[in-house]
Image (cartoon, rainbow, N blue to C red):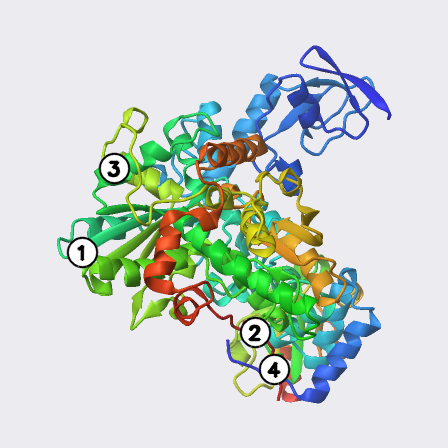
Amino acid sequence: MNLVKLTIDNKPVVVENGTTILEAAKSIGVRIPSLCYMKMDDMNFENKPGGCRVCVVEVEGRRNLAPACKTECTEGMVVNTHTVRVINARRTVVELILSDHPAECLTCAKSGECELQDLAQNLGIREIHYTGEQSHYKGDQSPAIIREMDKCIMCRRCETACNEVQTVGVLSAVNRGFESVVAPAFEMDLDHSVCTYCGQCVAVCPTGALTERDYTWKVIEALVDPTKTVVVQTAPAVRAALGESFGMEPGSLVTAKMVSALRKLGFDYVFDTDFAADLTIMEEGTELLDRLNRHLNGDQEVKLPILTSCCPGWVKFFEHQFPEMMDVPSTAKSPQQMFGAIAKSYFAKKLDKKREDLVVVSVMPCLAKKYECTREEFSVNGDPDVNVSITTRELAQLIRNANLDFASLPDDDFDQPMGESTGASVIFGTTGGVIEAAVRTAYELHTGKILEKVDFKELRGMEGSRKATVDFDGLKLNIGIAHGLGNARKLLEEVKAGKSEFHAIEIMACPGGCIGGGGQPYHHGNVDILKKRQRAIYEEDKGKPIRKSHENPFIQELYKEFLGKPMSDLSHELLHTHYFDRKKKAEVE
Amino acid sequence: MAKVKIPENKVQELKDLCASYNNEPGELINVLHGAQGMFGYLPAEVQEIVADQMNVSVAHVYGVVTFYSFFSMLPKGKHPISICMGTACYVRGAEKVLDEFKRHLEVKVGETTPDGKFSLSCLRCVGACGLAPVVTIGERVYGRVSPEDVKGILGEY
């Protein structure tokens, strides 16, 4: 390993050869402001086009200022990060960016979270000396994502997320010069493109150019409608991140306060998507065992590995990119949709109400869920199983709207029956969690033995794709895990080529799983936040008295009273789905 | 954008073109160059086939097509007219020549006449500065063109 010695702001520093000035400065606590730059090692995310020039520094003996994100340290280099020349250059750069940026901060959805706004404030910019034409682009409103490209600063982070990390390939810089903009092919709207709505572009956008479609007002309308019974479900990853929106430490578990807030907001029933996650395990786990047993009995037709189907971003991804493999993923609906289907049948019946009288709201860490609940197959006579899906961020907005002091809310518990959940369902919120939950149940169903050790550490972690072998009492089950669609693609190519060694693969579209979803409080590139959320999720699992899905008493009751058994006819009707070939094909004459 | 249907044999020709560059993503510009030679322009459908063959996203192909002024998504006329706007031609009155073409053809730069006969575009230097201002129509080169010549030149077609 070659080391180089240099000085940054009079502080000596020794770094590995190839380290950039920005990274070297960070290692000794010198903060150099940046804008387009973003790097998340564990997520395979690196965006440093060197385009914005905000991170320029003065290097002695060098005529021009150097972009710290792109310039590698050399032996004996003397770097000054805050000279008058540097500060003036930064101010000029930011003023120039602002001169072509709508001054809509007061009403912008990103206000308070905007990195450009922060930068302008930190540099003390009070006046923009450059006036001229401003660029205007076509707006785009999909069911999940809003693109307001007038606010784009061409940092290209969304492109890196979409193309490098997710390999979805919707976004590219198009046109040239003043007209250049990041857009889908032919500048089509997102809902005509192969976008999966994973929302990773939104998660990394520094400004308000990419934001979620805000449905908070739809929720308020439902809450004030006296003819409606409003039921809310909250996804596992929400409780591990919501606190961040109220200044709490990342990784704070706020389940009890979240329930309290939802009740104060006026929801009639505060339920938990975790309940439906337990239900998902019953169906998906049974399907796994069914396929496995058929395979072991010599059935050549059966498709293995089975792929999880909880993630709507992932579902849309394979519908576009791997339609020839549509019979490989599990047919189980996602927990959000299972919840909606059961709420509007079983629970509506319990209340003696019609399904149309119920409004089901979901709080999700996810943007793809907004799209998922609009899919036609998840409606009955035009009435969707889930009416509105809002993000963790939108829930925080609703809580602020209602002037609730979140930190001081009393603790509260979910309602029954659809609020009861096990530790197995909580871990659905992180990569590795769904398959661990499935293993806990499938092991007992398959072997008929009690599983003493429920923690499968070998399935946990943050590496993009992982594998482990779990011993089902002599039967060795090979399990694959991928998070981030780029990692999923690699495993899928193997399956397609018939080279996959796995019996089951868990796939989540977002890096980290749902804890890193596009609807979570912004992490601004700090991967530690995701790791803390992950720890919180496993903490919640550990604290649960029941940690296997099939032991959830209300799930047992649901099957006894209503569904019969997993994969029964009624289960198939309500809890399973089918997929569509969405591959784009050029028309040929 | 009007849907274009590409004849089956042309699709094969296009795929062969991509294959001749080993479907190597780094050869995208060369492939697009060849494809524009084949079709006269690069409609969305052509870009989709190229993207599929070369294993890059359609958005990426579109990004390249829109970046380079050489590439066009509009069909060219039967006789594509290019007026050189390089320094030498410009100082010798290329702009006046261009205005005259615009006036006669009633189209803007980048457009094609409604009958599909002529399309009008500008380029930067054809390397014949001694003949400035230069106009090319198809493969033919016209030198020392003055606005008064325009009507006569168009009359040749």
- Residue A363: tell me if it is visible: no
Q: Amino acid at mark 2?
A: Glu
Which circle, 4 or 1, is nearer the viewer?
1
Measure the C-alpha gap from mark 3 to mark 1: 21 Å
Q: Residue at left 39%, top 49%?
A: A275
Residue B141: % across, % down = 75, 76
Q: Which residue is under mark 1?
A: A228
Residue A13 image-quadrant placement: top right
Measure the C-alpha gap from mark 4 to mark 1: 64 Å
Q: Earlier in the sequence, mark 4 or mark 2?
A: 2
Callouts 3 and 1 on one subunit: yes
Q: Subunit of mark 4? A: B
Q: Identify the mark at residue A41; answer none if there is no mark.
A: none
Q: Secondary structure at mark 2?
A: helix
Measure the C-alpha gap from mark 1 to mark 2: 69 Å
Q: Residue at left 32%, top 46%?
A: A271
Which circle, 3 or 4, is nearer the viewer?
3
Residue B113: % across, % down = 55, 82
Q: Which residue is under mark 3?
A: A401
Q: Which residue is under mark 4?
A: B118
Q: Height in image: B86 above or below A54?
A: below
Q: Nearer the viewer, residue A562 or A406?
A: A562
Which circle, 3 or 1, is nearer the viewer?
1
Measure the C-alpha gap from mark 4 to mark 2: 14 Å
Callouts 3 and 2 on one subunit: no
Q: Amino acid at mark 3?
A: Asn
Which circle, 4 or 2, is nearer the viewer?
4
- Could you tell me if the residues under marks 4 and 1 are in contact, i.e. CB atoms within 8 Å? no
The total number of labels drawn is 4
